[in-house]
Image (cartoon, rainbow, N blue to C red):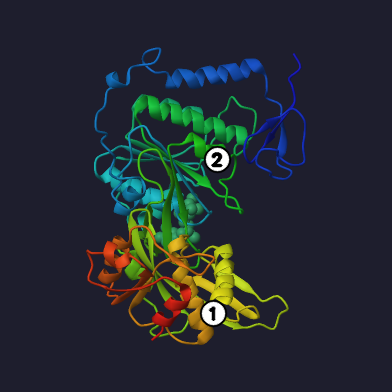
C-alpha cells in the first residue's frame, strides 16, 4: 500500500494533507514539513503500546468516593528552591519538563539535585544524551557533587533501552538530559524531530505513571522562546519549569509555568558561581545589594512572584533624544507596559517625555512581570526625568490605570512585611493599603492618582 503523504507543523504538531506556507493553527511560517510514516498499521501499533503501558487496572469509570486517596510522599530533591518550584518536592509518577536556553545551567541544576537525592538514599539515574559520562563526572567533581553509590550515569539516547532498564530496575528518579537527543528506534524520523520528541515524551510519561517513577526531562528553548520541537510537549507533561536569567549575570530564576501538583508562578532563585549553583534564600536582599544610594531614576518595587514577595530595583534613564523617533529600550519588564506608562505620565502628569529617550531595566538581570510594578516604573521614569532621587529606604507598589489612577494590588500585607524586613522605612501604595497591611509597622503613604503620588515620593 502506498503510504499517504502528510504535512506536520514542526512547532505545534498540527497535521494537514496539503502543504501551506503558514501553519493555520499556530501561525508559524514555513514550519510544515512532509511526514511519510503515516502507515496506519504502524500508528496503531504505537498507540497500542502507549495504551498498554498506561493501562489502568480495571475497566470503566469508578465512583469518586471509591477512588483511593493516600497522601503522596513527595521526593525531596535536597534544594529548597527547587522543591518550592515543584510545589514541595517531586510527586511519584510525575513527568517534569525543565526548559531553558542552552548554557543557562539546566544540566548543572539537575546534576546537583540528582546528587542530593541520591545522597538521601534514592536510586537516581542521570541519562545524558548530550555529554559523555566522563564529561558529566568532571562537572560533578567541579560542583562538589557527592560521589554517591546511588547516583547512576548513563550516556544513552536509545529510548527503548532506557525504558526496558528503568522498568526492570525501578530506580527512584530518572533524569533525561535532553528530550531532543532521545530517539525511539521504531520511528523513521530523526532525533529532535516533532514526531520523535512527541513519541519519546509520551512513552516516558506512560512508564512514569505505570511505575510511580518520577522523571525530569530537559528541553531546550528556541530563539523565540518556545520549547524546541512541538509546543505539545507542554501539554504532555505534568509540570513545566523554565530556567531563565541573563548569561552575564549570576542570578538564575526557576519559574513554574504549569503544575498539576502545585501552584504555578512559583519561583526559585539560584546564583551560578565557580562551583555550580547555590540557592538564594533571600532574593530581595541579593537583588538590592548593589543599589546606589539616592540616585535619580532608581526605585524599589515591592513585587510578588507566586506566594513569594520580592523586592527589586527598577532603574530608569530618561534623556533628551536626537532621533526623530526617541529610543525606548526595556529589559526585564514588559516593553508595552513601559510605553503605556510613558504615555500616562505625559498625559496625566504633564511630563514632556515625547522627545526623550527612555531606558528601563531591572537590576540583577532578572525578569519580572506584574501590574503592581507599574508605579515603581513610573516613579523611576519621573525621577530620572526630573533628576530628583526618590526618598531613601522607600519601596513602591501599585498598578497604574490609563486615567492616571493608582489601583490596589494583591497581597499588600505580604509586600509590606517584606519591605519592612529588608529595612525599608516607607511604602508608597494605593489607597486602602494601610487597612489591609496591619501586620507590618512600615510607614505607608497612600495616594489615589499618579499626580498626587509624584508629590509624595521625592525627597
Ligand atoms: P549547563 O548546566 O551545561 O547548561 P545547560 O545544560 O542549560 O546547557 O551550564 C553551562 C554554563 O554554566 C556554562 O556556560 C558554564 C557555567 N557554569 C559555571 O559558571 N559554573 C559551574 O560550576 C558550572 C558547572 C557551569
Ligand atoms: Mg546541558
Residue at (49% x, 34% y) in the render: 236
Lower position in the chain sequence, tag 2 or tag 1: 2
Q: In the visual, does 412 lie left or right of 201?
A: left
Asked if disc 2 is less than 8 Å from ligand 2, the answer is: no
Judging depth in this view, the residue of 270 and 422 nearest the camera is 422
Residue at (26% x, 71% y) in the render: 420
In the structure shown, which secondary structural element does the residue marked by tag 2 occupy? Answer: helix
Judging depth in this view, the residue of 96 and 341 nearest the camera is 341
Judging depth in this view, the residue of 142 and 263 nearest the camera is 263
Tag of residue 317: 1
Judging depth in this view, the residue of 159 and 303 nearest the camera is 303
Q: In the visual, does 240 lie left or right of 4?
A: left
Asked if disc 1 is less than 8 Å from ligand 1, the answer is: no
- Give the CA distance from mark 2 to mark 1: 44 Å
Residue at (62% x, 38% y) in the render: 12
Residue 400, how many percent across, how many down?
48, 66
Quadrant housing the N terminus: top right
Residue 364, how many percent across, how many down?
44, 69
Residue 439 quadrant: bottom left
Q: Can residue 279 be seen in the rendering of this structure?
A: no
Q: In the visual, does 234 lie left or right of 224?
A: left
Tag of residue 181: 2
Quadrant housing the C terminus: bottom left
Residue at (45% x, 72% y) in the render: 449
Nearer mark to the viewer, of 2 and 1: 1
Residue 170, how many percent across, how many down?
34, 28
Tag of residue 20: none
Relative to 27, say whether 277 is above or below: below
Amino acid at each position: 500500500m502506498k503510504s499517504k503523504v502528510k504535512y506536520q507543523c514542526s512547532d505545534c504538531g498540527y497535521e494537514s494533507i496539503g502543504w501551506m506556507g503558514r501553519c493555520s493553527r499556530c501561525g508559524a511560517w514555513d514550519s510544515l514539513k512532509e511526514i511519510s510514516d503515516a502507515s496506519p498499521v504502524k500508528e496503531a501499533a504505537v498507540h497500542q503500546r502507549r495504551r498498554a503501558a498506561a493501562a489502568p487496572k480495571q475497566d470503566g469509570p469508578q465512583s469518586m468516593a471509591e477512588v483511593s486517596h493516600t497522601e503522596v510522599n513527595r521526593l525531596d530533591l535536597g534544594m529548597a528552591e527547587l522543591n518550592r518550584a515543584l510545589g514541595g518536592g517531586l510527586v511519584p509518577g510525575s513527568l517534569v519538563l525543565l526548559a531553558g536556553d542552552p548554557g543557562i545551567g539546566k544540566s548543572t541544576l539537575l546534576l546537583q539535585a540528582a546528587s542530593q537525592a541520591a545522597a538521601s538514599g534514592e536510586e537516581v539515574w542521570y541519562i545524558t544524551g548530550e555529554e559523555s559520562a566522563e564529561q558529566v563526572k568532571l562537572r560533578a567533581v567541579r560542583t562538589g557533587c557527592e560521589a554517591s553509590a546511588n547516583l547512576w550515569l548513563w550516556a544513552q539516547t536509545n529510548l527503548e533501552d532506557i525504558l526496558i532498564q528503568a522498568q526492570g530496575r525501578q530506580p527512584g528518579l530518572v533524569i533525561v538530559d535532553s528530550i531532543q537527543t532521545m530517539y525511539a528506534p521504531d520511528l523513521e524520523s530523526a532525533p529532535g524531530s516533532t514526531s520523535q520528541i512527541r513519541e519519546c515524551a509520551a512513552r516516558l510519561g506512560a512508564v512514569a505513571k505505570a511505575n510511580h517513577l518520577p522523571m525530569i526531562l530537559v528541553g531546550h528553548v528556541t530563539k523565540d522562546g518556545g520549547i524546541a520541537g512541538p509546543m505539545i510537549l507542554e501539554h504532555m507533561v505534568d509540570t513545566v519549569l523554565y530556567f531563565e536569567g541573563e548569561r552575564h549575570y549570576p542570578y538564575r530564576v526557576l519559574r513554574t509555568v504549569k503544575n498539576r501538583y502545585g501552584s504555578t508562578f512559583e519561583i526559585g532563585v539560584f546564583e551560578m558561581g565557580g562551583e555550580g549553583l547555590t540557592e538564594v534564600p533571600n532574593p530581595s536582599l541579593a537583588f538590592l545589594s548593589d543599589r546606589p544610594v539616592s540616585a535619580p531614576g532608581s526605585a524599589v518595587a515591592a513585587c510578588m512572584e507566586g506566594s513569594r514577595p520580592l523586592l527589586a530595583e527598577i532603574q530608569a534613564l530618561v534623556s533628551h533624544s536626537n532621533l526623530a523617533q526617541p529610543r525606548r529600550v526595556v529589559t526585564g519588564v514588559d516593553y508595552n507596559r513601559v510605553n503605556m506608562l510613558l504615555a500616562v505620565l505625559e498625559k496625566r502628569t504633564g511630563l514632556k517625555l515625547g522627545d526623550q529617550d527612555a531606558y528601563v531595566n531591572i537590576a540583577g538581570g532578572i525578569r519580572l512581570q506584574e501590574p503592581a510594578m507599574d508605579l515603581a516604573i513610573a516613579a523611576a521614569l519621573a525621577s530620572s526625568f526630573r533628576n530628583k532621587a526618590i526618598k531613601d529606604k522607600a519601596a513602591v507598589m501599585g498598578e497604574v490605570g490609563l486615567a492616571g489612577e493608582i489601583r490596589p494590588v494583591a497581597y499588600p500585607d505580604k509586600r509590606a512585611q517584606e519591605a519592612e524586613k529588608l529595612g525599608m522605612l516607607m511604602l508608597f501604595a494605593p489607597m486602602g493599603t494601610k487597612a489591609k497591611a496591619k501586620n507590618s509597622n512600615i510607614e505607608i503613604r497612600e495616594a489615589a492618582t499618579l499626580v498626587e503620588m509624584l508629590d509624595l515620593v521625592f525627597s
